[in-house]
């Protein structure tokens, strides 16, 4: 059976995806602290040997309607740890 990629403890780049507004009542949540942050990492080959970018998406509770809203990850960041497009392109190129 296969295994999944392992995350690194110290990513090279961290991108924070913040919740700005409640998706239910549209209240401004920019000053509301996050109740949870999920992490996903993308392992890719930049112009230097290797770079790991960690995407962090906050979840916040709206003080008005008490609904929980989570920031969205970019569409191409779909797994907890994954290979990036540059690394995949180089593997495909080297395989062919």
Image: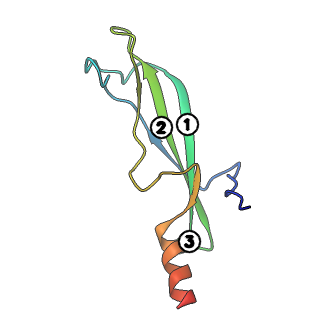
> Could you say where residue 54 lies in the image, as x and y percent from the top left?
55, 50
Q: Residue lying furthest top in this view?
A: 64
Disc 1: CA contacts within 10 A as few (<14), some (14-19) or many (>=20): some
- Label 1: which secondary element: strand
> Could you say where residue 11 lies in the image, as x and y percent from the top left?
63, 53
For residue 56, above or below residue 60: below
> Could you say where residue 85 lies in the image, as x and y percent from the top left?
47, 69
- Label 3: which secondary element: loop
Check disc 2 and report the residue beneath it.
Answer: 57
For residue 3, above or below residue 14: below
Check disc 3 and report the residue beneath it.
Answer: 45
C-beta proximity under 8 Å, tags 1 and 2: yes
Residue drawn at (47%, 27%) of the image: 59
Disc 3: CA contacts within 10 A as few (<14), some (14-19) or many (>=20): some
Check disc 1 and report the residue beneath it.
Answer: 38
17 with respect to 51 (left or right):
left
């Amino acid at each position: 059976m296969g295994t999944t990629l392992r995350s690194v403890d110290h990513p090279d780049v961290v991108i924070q995806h913040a919740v700005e507004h409640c998706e239910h009542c549209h209240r401004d949540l920019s000053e509301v602290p996050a109740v949870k942050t999920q992490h996903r990492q993308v392992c890719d080959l930049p112009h230097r040997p290797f770079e790991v970018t960690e995407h962090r998406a906050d979840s916040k509770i709206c003080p008005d309607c008490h609904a929980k809203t989570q920031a969205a990850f970019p569409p191409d960041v779909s797994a907890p740890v994954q290979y990036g497009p540059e690394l995949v392109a180089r593997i495909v190129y080297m395989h062919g």
